Amino acid sequence: MKWIRTSLLPAAVLLLCNRAPADLLYGTRGLGFAGAYSARADDNFGTTVNPAALSIYRRYHILAFYTLSSMKNTYSTGVIAVDSKTSDIAMGLFYINQGFLPLGKANGEYSFSTTSITDNYWGLSISENYMNLFFIGITLSMHTMRSSMGNDDTFTMDLGIIAPVGDYFLIGFTAYNPLRYGYNRLKQLNDPRRRAIALGAVFHYQNVLFLQADWQRDLEDLRGNHHRIAFGFSAVGRRYFEVRFGYARDFFFSSNEIGAGMSFRGPRFSIDYSYFVIRRNGNLPNEEKHSLAVTVALF
């Protein structure tokens, strides 16, 4: 991939936001960084992580992914297309489907509910490089939830801005769901429609080594303690192979989260795989995820 302006962007450092703890939208590579990927977003998942990131790289790519969780009948799959090559304005389209059994609370203990829920996410992202001073983006999306407890349709908007600082850093801010219409039922803690913010950073050395960090905050937790920190590291060998690792601590669930993954990049395609594990305290169950994504360059 090529930077839109190499002099400003040889180092991918993003100060971003992500919705916490909805790892559904971290993406395959993001799971390998334990969610710290919100500060990098150098693939098509910029549409769901920070729309401003779409303008950083020139590309015309389509991505397909599948994620399988150790939780019973839990999966997510989708397709994301991004074009930041044919126009000064970058655009992205995505469709994501998730089916799962949510956590319920019975007799004072957390357990799996018998209610089956399916989520569908459709979205459009637009991003622009404003005079090489900063990048700004917006994502408009429709979320539809179908379950035996009722249906729920929600329209949401995400806003993001990224500004380069020197040759090795970018800083930015993203607000998730500041505008939201709908959202009447099933207000789960892991629902990506909740309002959230996060701050993150990535330090880059010669496009070979990346150090990443994120702080994420759920704004709808009335107790005020739902925040999460995540750290990530990746190394790139000869531009074709990457290994990545990540660690996160969720202070609401008192959980430790670890991610790892690898990527192979060819001239016209890339293959990404990540493994993500959540170790929760108390009665909450542990969880493991395997995610695979294939990206193809259209031209």
Image (tube, grey):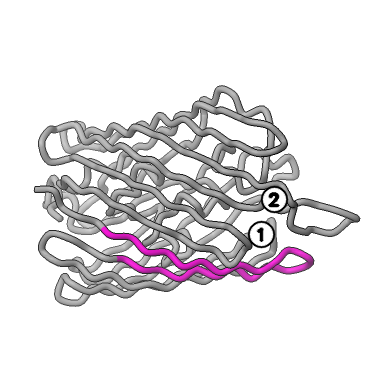
> Residue at (56%, 69%) from the top-left corner?
288
* Residue name at image x 32 percent, y 73 percent: 262
Residue matched to label 1: 251
**In the rendered view, does 94 fall on the left or right side of 22?**
left
**Residue at x-position 28% and y-position 52%:** 63
In the picture, residue 253 is in which quadrant? bottom right
The magenta region covers 272-294
Using the image, determine if residue 193 lies above or below residue 258.
above
* Pointers 1 and 2 in contact (C-beta within 8 Å): yes
Q: Amino acid at mark 1?
A: Phe
Magenta-drawn stretch, dominant element (helix, strand or loop): strand
Q: Position of residue 269 (x, y in %)?
A: 18, 61
The residue pinned by badge 2 equals 225
Q: Does 288 lie within the magenta span? A: yes
The percent coordinates of residue 194 (x first, y second) are: 59, 38
Look at the numbered disc 2 and give the secondary structure of its residue. loop
What kind of residue is marked 2?
Answer: Asn
Left or right placement of residue 137 versus residue 215 in this view: left
Q: Position of residue 290 (x, y in %)?
A: 46, 68
Q: Is residue 2 left or right of residue 165?
A: left
Instruction: Give the alpha-carbon distance from disc 1 to disc 2, as whole Å.
Output: 7 Å
